[in-house]
Amino acid sequence: MSKDRRNNYDEPRRLKWWAKLLVVAMAASLVVAGWKGIPLLEEKVEEYKENFQSEETTSLNVEESQSLYEENLSNGKDEDLPEESSKAAEESKQPEKEENSKAKVTARGYSNSFAGYTSAIVANGGLRTTTNSYYDANGLDVSIKIEDDDNVIIEAFKNDEIDFFFMTVNKMPIVCKELQEAGKEAVIPYITDTSTGGDGIVANNEYNSIASLQNARIGMARDSVSEAMLIWLLNMQNEVDANAVISNFELYNSTQEAVDAFVRGEVEAVATWDLASALEKEGSHLLFSSKDAEYLIIDALVVDKDFAEQNPDVVTGIIDGCIAVVSDINSNENADKEDRFINEYAIIRGSVPDFETYGNKAMTELLGDSRQLGYAKNIEVFEIAKGIYEDFCAVWNQIGFETSASNVDSLFDMSYITPLQSKWESSEVLAKESIIAAETDIDREALMSYTAHILFVPNMAELREDKEEENMAMLDEFVRRAKILNKTIIIIEGNVSLSPGNTSGEFDYKLSYERAKVPKEYMVEQGIDAERIVIIGNGGDKPIATNDTPEGRELNRNCIFSFYQGETE
């Protein structure tokens, strides 16, 4: 499994390709030193030092590399690499041709070791643009370096050493604040991928809802997107005081430490990207994963705003190459999953040290934790991504970071992807979600619930006209939540107030059911699949306030929205 692209990393990184190249160059210089003298070696070393003077490495020797590969094999993660794949991987690591090394670099960027960002690497044919790659066809010359420390990436961006990088949208609120303080601006012109099961919460079996975690000790990496994700989920329900639950957080220096603490029984739940390791604990279960909320964790291409404005065709060309790779993936969906991307996998293995020992099966599993997005999905996700950015501004504020949501409209800029509409729009058909709700699903505990104070006219299933603004704001918020939690079942329960001393009758049950239909119809109009939604009439059996006062009876005329996981074991 890849390391978390959302945290800083405390693990030594493998010897980078350029360091290997330096070793080869130095050895070659020693061979010829006998007849040209030692100054040649010094000249070659200085040349490479000049090219890579700002980079540091820690090496992984041959024995350690072989040991890691054998460990992967013994864990069942991998298999022997196909001969043609191994050959392609070796070729991808060959030094660049002399003419390429002298070519002007059109765009410089950083990517970390997250599989979701690899469409750009594949489109580039590796870390430098290669002949006949998508970027080469677009007239681009792009250099990409692998860097797993977000702090290094941000510093390079602030110092104009790179023009673009890849980052999780959920972390961008604190990144943007740092950039603003340095006088830098960025734009997000393209959504690279969404998490589809790579992030989530594992808990002991007695915890079956997000609300139940308010009484649990919860482990997570300090200041990680996993921590922010959990706070977002807690904020989505009004019966939980998220700030109070934060006091139960057990913060660790890394995801590995948090997962280990959960497995040892030191905490009752863990928010993590390493779900497989956490689930090794006996008596645990997957409480929530990003499979339930495909648009909760979103990743993006981030570009220097000045560079983008001066080179719009370059930015559009970078996006076009990524979409072309995604199109290739989608067009091969009926092929054998482990064999259909041998060339793509070879490029990734030859470019990202973390993946160099992964076979096709392991690569397929790795890439399955995220969904790389094409043109149509980007158009669909852009508005959702803006809402996620705003939500996580508030979440990071709760954690203790200073953020600002005022830049959201300028940050998310679709002007660089829309020129590709005529080329890609018709080639990608968005599949309808297949979640179908059944009323038996209410027999289990809801993942999340929220009581919406939609104000109805007494004794009617009509919204109060004098409260239209408040009602519409509430309904729009639930449409937004339903789009983020897009693989969940939605239960809408309508409720009525009762005169003091009365019990529910046939009229009350019918009225409450008709009230539940009102938000369902609105949500369907806004694009939510009707088959995901179940409506129920509770009559007056679930009051949230006293019926003895007019104010209490008004509160009891409401709807309760609950989200249930779409799949059960």
Image (cartoon, rainbow, N blue to C red):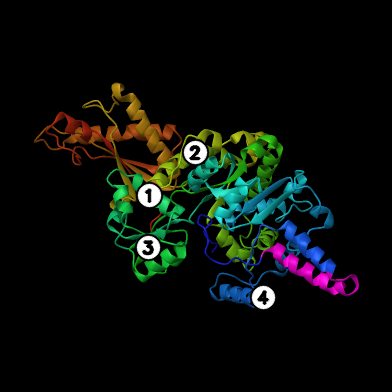
Q: Amino acid at mark 4?
A: Val
The answer to which of 112 and 333 lies nearer the viewer is: 112
Q: How far apart are labels 2 and 4 at the CA level?
A: 46 Å
Q: Secondary structure at mark 1?
A: helix
Q: How far apart are labels 3 and 4 at the CA level?
A: 39 Å
The answer to which of 313 and 84 lies nearer the viewer is: 313
Using the rendered image of the protein, determine whether residue 84 is visible from the camera's viewpoint. no
| Residue at the disc numbered 1 | 231
Task: Name the front one of labels 2 and 4.
Answer: 4
Q: Residue 104 location, x and y as percent?
A: 78, 47
| Residue at the disc numbered 4 | 62
The answer to which of 235 and 429 lies nearer the viewer is: 235
Q: Judge left or right: residue 229 versus residue 168.
A: left
Q: Secondary structure at mark 3?
A: strand
Q: Amino acid at mark 1?
A: Ile
Whether pointer 3 and pointer 1 mark residues with C-beta atoms closer than 8 Å, the reply is no
> Which of the marked residues, 3 or 2, is nearer the chain's N terminus?
3
Q: How far apart are labels 3 and 1 at the CA level?
A: 20 Å
Q: How far apart are labels 1 and 2 at the CA level?
A: 18 Å
Q: Amino acid at mark 3?
A: His
> Which of the marked residues, 4 or 1, is nearer the chain's N terminus?
4
Which numbered disc covers residue 549? none
Question: Is 262 a magenta residue?
Answer: no
In the figure, residue 249 lies in which quadrant? bottom left
- Range of the magenta residues? 16-38
In the figure, residue 391 lies in which quadrant? top left
Q: Judge left or right: residue 278 versus residue 111.
A: left
Q: How far apart are labels 3 and 2 at the CA level?
A: 32 Å
| Residue at the disc numbered 3 | 285
What residue is rendered at 37% in x and 62% in y? 285
Q: Residue furthest top?
A: 466
